Image (cartoon, helix red, strand yellow):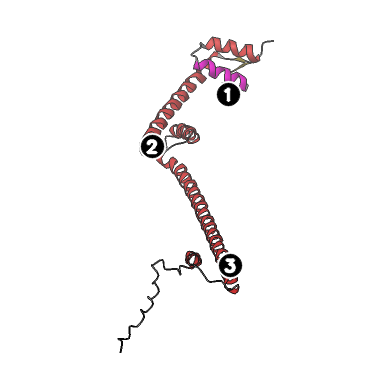
Amino acid sequence: MASFAQSDVGKLSPEAQALIHRMLDQDEEMWAIRRAVQRLSGERVMLQAISRYASGYAERRKQGQQARTETDDFIRLAGKKGVKVSELLRATLIETLVVARRKKEFTKADLFKLDDAERKRREFELKQRQARKSARREMKELELKERQMQMAEQRLQLIRDKAQAEIEKLDHKVRAGELLSPDDLRRIDEIFGLYDDTPQPTDDPEPEPSDGTDE
């Protein structure tokens, strides 16, 4: 007994429908499509059903191509305005445009409305990245200042230690009854800035012997 021939392509198995789509894209003949479906899944379909489906499928293909063309035109225009459209948004735009075209409720200018969400998302992410970058920069600046303060304190402590050591040497020298030399003063000057490196006044000349003429 022959199996019933299907009059609605939409009721065929997914595999059979996918095969029909591929063969329609390749502009295959209706009778060749019907035979290929039967070989694939054993399903039988009327030629008239394939013909009706092919007409609607061709119209959908045309709408899809038109949607892709308009979307790509929009993407190029947006690019000139400095707006970058992701591949995900492009696919969504095409799908939305096809559906809207069927309902006759969409104009090409409305594509910019669909881009608002993507633009706002990018702006939000940019602000987040800028905020994180600013926080990291402030943290680095704070860490640098702390290191500079630590280094300054270490240098100051080294100066204090050196000064203390020199003072102790001089104190020991004085306690031992020794006089401080110009080199000792220079070392003090290196630390405290007390030494004045100017020529020291010479001793006064000894008075000449009196010849008895002085009054």
Q: Nearer the viewer, residue 157 or 35?
A: 157
Q: Which residue is mark 2?
A: 78
Q: Amino acid at mark 1?
A: Gly
Label 1 SS? helix
Please identify, in this view, whether the residue under mark 2 or under mark 3 is nearer the observer.
Answer: 3
State the separation of the CA atoms marked 2 and 3: 80 Å
As for residue 118 lying within the magenta part, the answer is no
Q: Quadrant of residue 200?
A: bottom left
Find the distance from the CA under tag 2 to the CA under tag 1. 39 Å
Tell me where residue 154 appears, x and y as whole percent: 56, 60
- Our reading of the magenta stretch's main secondary structure is helix
- Which quadrant is home to the N terminus? top right
Circle 3 residue = 169
Q: Pinpoint residue 3: horizontal percent, then vertical percent.
A: 66, 13
Give the magenta-colored segment's residue range. 14-25
Mark 3 residue element:
helix
The amino acid sitting under disc 2 is Ala
Instruction: Report how far apart the C-alphas of labels 1 and 3 lie in the structure.
Output: 106 Å
Q: Which mark is residue 10?
A: 1
Visible residue check, residue 18: yes
Expressed as whole percent of the image width and height from the top left, the position of residue 64 reads 46, 27
Q: Nearer the viewer, residue 166 or 2?
A: 166
